[in-house]
Amino acid sequence: MTEINMIRIKTNDVWKGGMAKSITFIVTKDCQLACKYCYLVGKNSNERMPWEVAKQAVDYILNHENDFAEESVVWDFIGGEPFLEIDLIDRICDYIKMEQFKKHHHWFNSYRFSFSTNGINYHEEKVQRFIDKNKNHLSIGITIDGTELKHDINRVYKASGKGSYQDVVRNIPLWLSQFPDASTKVTISSADIPYIKESVLHLYALGIHQVNINCVFEDVWKTGDDALFEEQLLLLADTIIDEGYYQDYACSFFSEHLGVPLDCKLQNQNWCGAGMMLAVDANGNFYPCTRFAQYSLRNKKAWIIGNIHDGIDKNKLRPFLMLDRCTQSTQECIDCEVASGCAWCQGENYDAADTPTIYQRSTAICKMHKARVRANNYYWSKLRYRQEADEKYNTNKMTLC
């Protein structure tokens, strides 16, 4: 029996089921863009991860296999814009693959390299060479916010202030040819609410079947935003159902599990994965999530839980392991009749809290969530009525035949 056959080969279902460890390398803080809603307030062109730091981070993680017992792993690379450091990333990924193999690590062949990119340099030869080499273990999302008008409101170049839509959309066909089931992430801020409906439909027209969309967690919302938001979602719901998009396309704003009271199971869950994830920066510091690194924080100090030399301080990580919905929510939130699906970001909670705590949940999106629930209820009521009518029509048609 060959050595490779002795290593446990796992199916792709493991990491898809939410059982994977997420490990994030902040390879650079530089980006071509200066997106107006970006939470990375400390982006700069000076900090990039040295190879030796990346290597030592990989060594620490793979040498402490018992501390990372998850069945699979997502090696995530972010910036800034990660593909600005494609040479470094390529070297890191080669090293990860070799070390997992050499160590007979349980993550061998049960891993993914994950990227969220602005898509601007996606077509470049070095990026494409990396994709060809790793395609069977890759997850790549290109962020495109919708129509050119909506996208260019927020996603502008750092140097010129010019919108980036045209430079992104030209790479969408290539991306979808390589990853036909890929999804995109759309961010909603106060300024671009009026363009939600047409933007989702535009992304469908580009060939993107899964649109993951969310409101920013920061306290940016103005009086009346929730009403306008609900109006856009109602218009979107009508079009998705009336035009039959629901059969082949999806938008994460609409979910059957949204907007019901909490049961005991939901009360004991944490929406956010901070603390279950691990992030490492250019200095070799470990964080419970990238949102706790200094370049992500407006008001608080970074929450460092260790480093590549001394390892992870479990006492600094412990508060995250105790988090659930009840320990950080007000009684009003716990008793809310539409609480399910109301999201939060642990890093934003920490940054917005009155004191340096992760146990004070920000409620900035409360009104937006309730508007979404109302539109979601409309969507599912209309869709079920449509499906029942279609079923009745088909039954009558068969009877007549």
Image (spheres, helix red, strand yellow):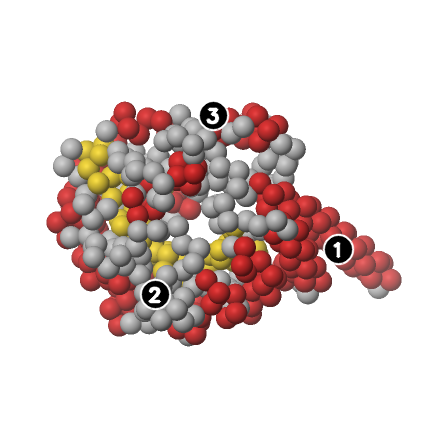
> Which residue is pictured at 68% across the width and 65% down the height?
243
How crowded is the residue under tag 3: few (<14 C-alpha within 10 Å), some, or many (20+)?
some
Q: Separation of disc 3 and disc 1 at Cα?
A: 41 Å
Does residue 331 sit above or below 243 in this rendering?
above
Q: Which of marks 1 and 2 precedes in the sequence?
A: 2
Q: Position of residue 353 (x, y in %)?
A: 43, 34
Q: Amino acid at mark 2?
A: Lys
Q: Secondary structure at mark 3?
A: helix
Between disc 2 and disc 1, the foreground one is: 2
Q: Which mark is residue 401?
A: none
Tag 2 and tag 1, C-beta contact below 8 Å: no
Q: Which residue is mark 2?
A: 158
- Residue 235: quadrant of the picture: bottom right
Q: Which of marks 3 and 2 precedes in the sequence?
A: 2
Q: Which residue is mark 3?
A: 327
Q: Which mark is residue 386?
A: 1
- Residue furthest to the right: 400
In front here: 95 or 23? 23
> Which residue is pictured at 65% across the width and 33% down the height?
337
> Which residue is pictured at 40% across the width and 60% down the height?
35
Q: Separation of disc 2 and disc 3 at Cα?
A: 40 Å
Horizontal arrangement in the rendering, residue 29 relative to residue 103 (left or right): right
Q: Position of residue 130 (x, y in %)?
A: 26, 64
